[in-house]
Amino acid sequence: MKDIEKIIKHANEENQEKINWTKAWSKKYPVLATYTNKVDVEKYGKEIRNLLESLQEEYQYTELDAMLVLKDILYQEWKNQKQ
């Protein structure tokens, strides 16, 4: 875990932009490589954009902070459903 924490601490925006995260994660989770052919991405994208904009407006978050908060809320909801 210490290695992962160290990598996260030293990651910067420029390095992260160079990585295709979907491609990287699809090696572990193949659905990430195929869902765009099945899922109405535009429909879900619009809903997500509305949630992001709502977080920005209500809490004066930056776009990045709103995305991180929404991502964490989604993860917490998923994790809680598994219990």
Image (tube, helix red, strand yellow):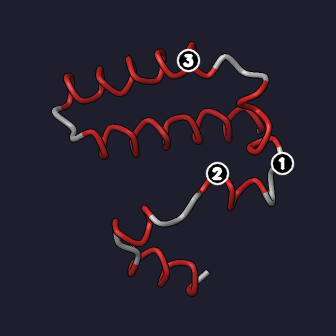
The one nearer the camera, 1 or 53, is 53
Circle 1: residue type: Pro
Q: Residue at x 67, y 36 (%)?
A: 78
Q: Secondary structure at mark 3?
A: helix
Q: Residue lying farthest left?
A: 60
Q: Could you tell which of marks 1 and 3 lies nearer the N-terminus?
A: 1
Crowd around label 3: few <14 · some 14–19 · many ≥20 (10 Å)? few
Q: Find disc 2 in the rendering and name its residue.
A: 22
Question: In the rendered picture of this protein, how many numbered marks are placed on residues?
Answer: 3
Q: Find disc 3 in the rendering and name its residue.
A: 42
Q: Could you tell which of marks 2 and 1 lies nearer the N-terminus?
A: 2
The reply, left or right, for residue 33 in relation to residue 52 is right
Q: Could you tell which of marks 3 and 2 lies nearer the N-terminus?
A: 2
Q: Residue at x 81, y 59 (%)?
A: 28
The reply, left or right, for residue 68 in relation to residue 54 is right
The answer to whether the residues at label 1 and label 3 have Cβ atoms under 8 Å apart is no
- Residue 27 placement: quadrant: bottom right
Crowd around label 1: few <14 · some 14–19 · many ≥20 (10 Å)? few
Across and down, in percent, residue 67 comes to: 39, 40
Q: Which mark is residue 30?
A: 1
Across and down, in percent, residue 11 comes to: 41, 75
Q: Secondary structure at mark 1?
A: loop
Across and down, in percent, residue 65 comes to: 30, 45
- Residue 55 placement: quadrant: top left
